[in-house]
Amino acid sequence: MSLTIVLAIVATALALPVLGWSILSPRFYRDPAAHRNLSRGLLPSPATVETDRGHPFADLARRFTPGSFIARLDRLLVRAGRPPAWPMKKVLSTKFLLAVAAACLGILYAAGSAGAGRYLLAAAAITLCYFVPDLLLYSQGTERQAAIAKGLADTLDQMTIAVEAGLGFEAAMSRAAYNGKGPLAEELVRTLQDMQVGRSRREAYTDLAARTSVTDLRRFVRSIIQADMYGISISGVLRTQAAEMRLKRRQRAEEKAMQIPVKVLFPLMFCILPVLFIVMLGPAAIGVINTFVK
């Protein structure tokens, strides 16, 4: 058995456990309260979180990762709600190990036959494996931001009803946050926790807008900050914002409904219509062919 085949077997044997570890590894948090706080974006105390276990390559990966990449990863984690199963150290370790495994396989593949195409393919595979965690976090963050935008109108309606019933704005936010479900409720809980630990309202609201990429939520936060600065009635602001969010949600639904015919056109032309023509015209074509053959 040649040395190249042996190295390929060893690299594959090393890559498969790394991939399985990155996907199926257990969570490193034991305290349920730490789970809930971290999922809302509030980092618990180091005594309750075991972030140093299971990540032997995190420090090495951090040395080879530029600071701008780490900052971008942190923004992706914030958008995704800081999943408990994917702390920063695990993400860095997974990126590093996947890139190393892909590099080993790519070198073996390129060494089999010298050619620029093989080297380009190996480089593309290494780049793809390195950015797989980023793509997964981006996808999860996009879904989370869409869920926030979808639930914003209903949450504002609840807060409007609570404020008009006599509650203060923070009490109405607390009621909507702790009675609600989903990422928007988690973000509101995080905002309330920020104010409870001593941050000002403006800072807590600004951080709420910075943690999300939802334009409607940012506009609502700016309206609340301006109302707090100039003494405008909160109930009126909430009522106006709730009506505007309901209107925008309806417009987005109508826009998606109008996009359906365009999205269905190509599958209809290339997948459904050919099969339909074969079923309908096939027997007739066979009959014509048999007639001319006879």
Image (cartoon, helix red, strand yellow):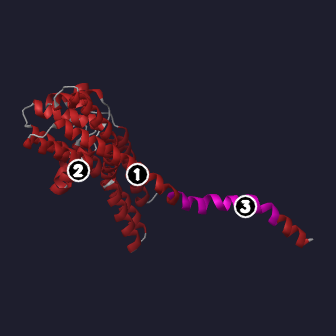
Left or right: 251, with 155 as reference point:
right
Q: Which element carries disc 1, helix, strand or loop?
A: helix
- Asked if labels 3 and 2 touch by Cβ distance under 8 angstroms, the answer is no
Q: Earlier in the sequence, mark 2 or mark 1?
A: 1
Q: Write down the residue under mark 2.
A: 73
Q: Few, some or many C-alpha atoms within 10 Å of disc 1 (few <14, some 14-19, many ≥20)?
A: some
Residue drawn at the location 25% of the way across and 43% of the way down: 241
User: Viewer-nearest of labels 1 and 3?
Assistant: 3
Which amino acid type is marked by label 2?
Answer: Leu
Q: Few, some or many C-alpha atoms within 10 Å of disc 2 (few <14, some 14-19, many ≥20)?
A: some
Q: Write down the residue under mark 3.
A: 278
Q: Position of residue 97 (x, y in %)?
A: 29, 50
Q: CA distance from mark 2 to mark 3?
A: 51 Å
Q: Is residue 265 magenta?
A: yes
Residue 12's tag is: 1
Residue drawn at the location 30% of the way across and 46% of the way down: 141
Which amino acid type is marked by label 3?
Answer: Ile
Q: Position of residue 232 (x, y in %)?
A: 12, 40
Left or right: 268, with 251 as reference point:
right
Residue 285 in which image quadrant: bottom right
Q: Looking at the picture, tell me which residue is in the foreground, 153 or 268.
A: 153
